[in-house]
Every structure is written in structure tokens, then in C-alpha cells.
Image: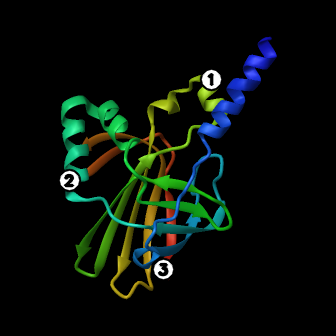
Amino acid sequence: MKTKRLFSVCLLLCFAGTPSFSKSKDNHGREKLTATLVDVSGPRAGTVRPIDIYIDNYSSDAESNQLAGAFADGGSKALFKILTKMKPKGRIAPVGRVGYEVRFIRSTQTPNGRKIVMLTDRPIGFLEAYYGTRSRDYQYALIEINIRDDGKKGEGSLIYAAKVKAFTGDTIEVENFGIQPAKLMVVRKL
């Protein structure tokens, strides 16, 4: 009985953590970026792999204000509750894999191009959930990309496990779980 219950919990957690992605009806607006992800610290230090970033659409001002209001009223927990109910705006995936949905994506103009900021709930692994480690308090993943107007050169970073410390419509401040952010290099728009 105990084994059957544990197996059921394992299956539930495995499928709950499996991201799904549905194509939008209009693929004309889809933006695709490629990058090389370099892990500089932690258990995957030295790992280099290509990734694809798909942006179906950007978060609206209303969605941004809704998240900012939730954070102002109830902090990180309220922000998480609203964010996880939002329709995905895109996904980030190692080449050849399904990847993970991204729920909040904003783009702002810079003098040389633009800055893209993405925030989403991060996948929690089975052992992390089972043991209830401190890392579970760091529920978000944050991606920042700076790309030139010509779309041929860019760079950025990926924080795998973050805790949101401040969220306004335009600024997201996070606390990293303790490993250096992964680097996104050779970012290109396809």
C-alpha cells in the first residue's frame, strides 16, 4: 500500500512538472531566438549547450500592473499565485527538447537595441519536492537578454532559482539561490 501511494505521488509529480506548450493560432508573430547557454557554477559548471527561445507574444501593461499590484499587496506568494495562472507567452528549451513555458515577457528599447526580460515559475524536481529543501523558496526563473537592433548579436543571463524581492511594472529585483547566473552567449534572432 505504501509503495503504491509513493508510486502514485511520483507519477503525479512527474506529470505535474512536465511542461506543455500549445501553438498559437497565428504563428506569424512568433519570434525565435537562439543562444548558447553556459553554466558557470553549481553542479553543471562548464556545461555548454544550445537553446531556443520562442516568444509568441509579450505581456501587456495590464498584466504587468496586475503582477505589480499582487506583489505590493501580498509579496512573492501573491505574485506567484497570479503568475502561475497566466497564459504562457513563450518557452525556453534546450535544442531538441520541449523546454519550459515562460509566463511573463517584456521588451524595452535600449540605445543599441532592446532588452527582453522573462519571469516564470521554475520546474521543481522530484527530490527537491520530496525533501523540501531550502531551494523551494526560490520559485522563479529569470532570463534577461540584451540584443542589438539587427538581431545578430546579443547576450544575457539565466537565473535558475530566484526569489523575487521587488516587482514594479518595469523592474524585477531577485535574490539568487547562491549559484552564479548561467550566461547566454551568441544570442541571435532567427
Q: Residue 156: x percent and y percent?
A: 43, 66
* Badge 2 element: helix
Q: Pick whichever, 114 or 102, lies toward us.
A: 102
Q: Residue 137: x percent and y percent?
A: 45, 31
Question: Is 96 drawn above or below residue 86 in the view shown?
Answer: below
The amino acid at mark 2 is Ala
* Badge 1 element: helix
Q: Residues within 10 Å of mark 2 (few under 14, many from 20)?
A: few
Q: Earlier in the sequence, mark 3 or mark 1?
A: 1
The amino acid at mark 3 is Arg
Is residue 167 visible from the viewing direction of this image? no
* Badge 3 element: strand
Question: Is 188 drawn above or below residue 96 in the view shown?
Answer: below
Q: Quadrant of residue 8?
A: top right
Question: Is 9 drawn above or below residue 184 in the view shown?
Answer: above
Q: Quadrant of residue 90?
A: bottom left
The amino acid at mark 1 is Tyr
Q: Residues within 10 Å of mark 1 (few under 14, many from 20)?
A: few
Q: Which residue is mark 1?
A: 131
Q: Residue 47: x percent and y percent?
A: 66, 60
Q: Earlier in the sequence, mark 2 or mark 1?
A: 2
Number of marks: 3
Q: Pick whichever, 173 or 41, lies toward us.
A: 173
Q: Quadrant of residue 58?
A: bottom left
Q: CA distance from mark 2 to mark 1?
A: 37 Å
Q: Which residue is mark 2?
A: 62
Q: Which residue is mark 3?
A: 188
Residue 14 left/right relative to 80: right
Q: What residue is shown at x 43% (from left), y 73% (from top)?
A: 26
